[in-house]
Image (cartoon, helix red, strand yellow):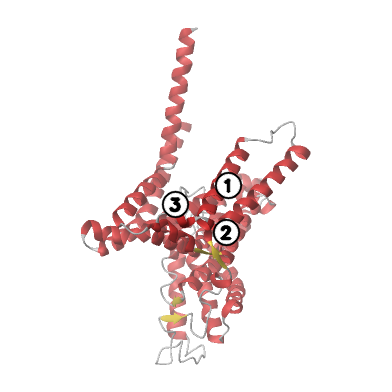
Amino acid sequence: MSNTKTFNNNLENKNTSLNIKSIFINHSVTILFVIICIIGIKLSKLPLFFIANELLTRITRNSFLVLSLIIPVLAGMGLNFGITIGAMAGQIAIIAVTHLGVTGIKGFLLCALLAVPLAMLFGYLTGKLLNKTKGQEMIASMIAGFFANGIYQFIFLFSIGTIIPMKDPVMMLSSGVGIRNTIDLSRNVGIKYALDNLLKLPVFKVCLVVALFTIIIYTLFRIYKVKYKDYKKEKFFSAKYITTITICLVIIIISCIFAFNSNHLPSQLKMFKNIKLPVITCIVILVLCLFNILIVKTKLGQDFRTVGQNKHIAKVSGIDVNKVRIIAITISTLLAAWGQLIFLQNIGTLNTYGSHVQIATFSIAALLIGGASVSRATIGQALLGTILFHTLFIVSPKAGKNLFGDAQIGEFFRAFVAYGVIGLSLGLHAWKKRIQFKKVG
């Protein structure tokens, strides 16, 4: 009996150590960057208010683009470097709307509308290409982005004013051929902050309302589920319910302190109540999160999953694999076009030939830092990665200056992080696959 008990204890300890080891292996990139961010914040010596304010701006600016990468991963197409092509579609729409002189939210909505046919066409063509390069989708989408960039530059640098007639002294070069390198989106009001400035509220008041709303809705949902659906199978006070309610209550307490009783807080923390949240932009991001959740529950979403897991089984099941893959990449391209519109209306300036160039690299790096891989990506990973990636971007120049006496080292570190994390993640993914293959073998 004692030998059996000792054996079971040893086995349990071994399983626990294996679980801890697997957690560290599976989340090694995320853990590494959490540590780097903490060190960077400490070294930068930047005020917490500045970091929080900048981070909130960057999260609302970039999250939509990062979330646009999830569906191709679900469909087994890997990391879509082709979102650069979607970003170009958004920029073409911005150039057209700016030339027409439509401003404000009307101009932004017109941009979103004009981007739809362009992004769908570009997505369809990209999907056709990726169907010819199965197994090499990431490198193919990257090269497709470079090729599309060449065509884009040819059109806007040489064709505008020659083949395509256009007269706009503000937007065009002095020679009358080609679009200027920089277009001010705030000119004559423009579309700068068109979405962000629709409704801005103090962040802690928004958190308070959202937490209260979450408690009410989730409680009603649990009552309905337990009473009418799974009364015998599920308890009302489940671990998930208690955890959710506890987190919401903590948010409510913190929000009340900052929103209504901040006089007793230190001067650095008092400033946090002045941070304002672009509510409409956040709602748009939330809608995309809900879209990514709900589409999985549809027939199309199940087809994405089946194709992503095994193309041969999907084909035998009667699924048109090529069509499903084209739909996945088209949706991603369209979302990227809209994401670029959100990004540029916040920046307020369009770099005609450069704004789209690093979009794919930075978005993919953010997704991977959150713990995603070539074969699996979630909304939580996308948002966590965006937070960590941009925290590092905010603090690295100042940390580099304080540590080495040169802010430029921090700038180099940004580029190193962006490309390094992609290489590291792809290397880890290949290593994990090799280990799994050896175990199966």
Mark whose residue sits in front, 3 or 2: 2
- Tell me where residue 334 sits by quadrant: bottom right
> Residue 206 has which mark?
2
Whether residue 251 can be seen here: yes
Direction left: furthest residue: 405
Q: Label 2 to label 1, Cα distance in Å?
A: 13 Å
Q: Would you say residue 139 is visible in this rendering?
A: no
Q: CA distance from mark 1 to mark 3?
A: 28 Å
Q: Secondary structure at mark 3?
A: helix
* Residue beneath disc 1: 248
Against 171, residue 302 (above or below) is above
Secondary structure under badge 2?
helix
Instruction: Name the residue at 51% across, 88% down.
Output: 164
Could you say where residue 415 lies in the image, as x and y percent from the top left? 33, 61
User: Left or right: 152 with respect to 334?
Assistant: left
Badge 3 crowding class, 10 Å Cα cut-off, few under 14, some 14 to 19, many 20 or more, is many
Q: Which residue is mark 3?
A: 368
Query: Mark 1 vs mark 3: which is more N-terminal?
Result: 1
